[in-house]
Image: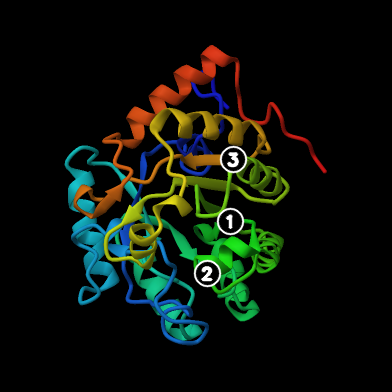
Amino acid sequence: MNNRYPYKTFPDFLKRFFPDTKVQKISLNAGFTCPNRDGTKGQGGCTYCNNQTFNPSYCKTDKSVFTQLEEGKVFFARKYPQMKYLAYFQAYTNTYDELDSLKKKYEEALNTPNVVGLVIGTRPDCMPDSLLDYLEELNKRTFLLVEYGIESTNNATLERINRGHTYEQTVDAIERTVARGIHTGGHVILGLPGENQEMIIQQAMQIAQLPLSTIKLHQLQIIKGTKMAKEYAECPTDFHLFNVDNYMDLVIDYIQHLNPEIVVERFLSQSPKELIITPDWGLKNFEFTNRLVNKMAELGAYQGKLFRNQ
């Protein structure tokens, strides 16, 4: 933690590896799918998921990894001409393919000028040891962060949202990845149906025991074109959707239970306004973060204040 932020920030984390340059992630859609979409484990994908919510306009599967990166760089280079980049394999499950095909896409990204590392988003049940063998070698020559969609630590919730894996599989994948010396991140959604505030704080206490480098927190949003949107229309009382103030209070409580060594990368999902059914707070990440930091200062709250190592 630095003097301004009462939690460990992602920019400070990156400065450990890139002390002399600004680094920005560029999202990619490399044409992957998911095992709960293609019939291997299920159909339809996660009930909350519409990948349009985080794919920039340049992320098109008919474009190569190199082309997507070059087009993504144009936006950031205007403001920061000396910027370096991390290729962020974000859309769907980015380890769900044959090993040779994965290697080709990862290496194509790393061979793009000014790309200095990879962030690979994936599922806990899509990390075979053969791929970890390759990633362990890759990690020795470039920056690498593997980010797992945890979403919940409750198996009943995971089944309800059609994840197709258990929390035990999540723990196993994280531990196997960390054992290879690879920086490992996680992503959770706060407010999934069936989970109350007590369960969410219990989740924070479980997450705190994992050997994670980073964590992302997102509020649940009901997004057009998803199965969850239909569920919400049919039975809105099944959902407890937070307003800004209640969510901020929850986040403060959550991160106070986290291990103080885990980097908190973000707190908010910013889906395109035209896709949001509810809640639409009209806040950008930095606006929410500024309010959060001020409130934590008022309360004397900080990451790890309530952490207990088990």
| Disc with the residue nearer the chain's start (2 vs 3) | 2
Give the residue at x 60% y 48%: 213
Return the residue at label 1.
Answer: 152
Callout 1 amino acid = Ser
Return the residue at label 3.
Answer: 197
Q: Position of residue 167 (x, y in %)?
A: 66, 63
Callout 2 amino acid = Arg
Is label 2 in a helix, a strand or a loop?
A: loop
Callout 3 amino acid = Gln
Is label 1 in a helix, a strand or a loop?
A: loop
Give the residue at x 64% y 46%: 199
Q: How many marks?
A: 3
Circle 2/circle 1 CB separation < 8 Å: yes
Return the residue at label 2.
Answer: 163
Quarter of the image with the N terminus is top right
Q: Residue 44's image quarter?
A: bottom left
Q: Nearer the viewer, residue 88 or 47?
A: 47
Looking at this view, name the residue that lies furthest to the top. Answer: 298
Quarter of the image with the C terminus is top right
Looking at the picture, does residue 280 appear above or below residue 131? Answer: above
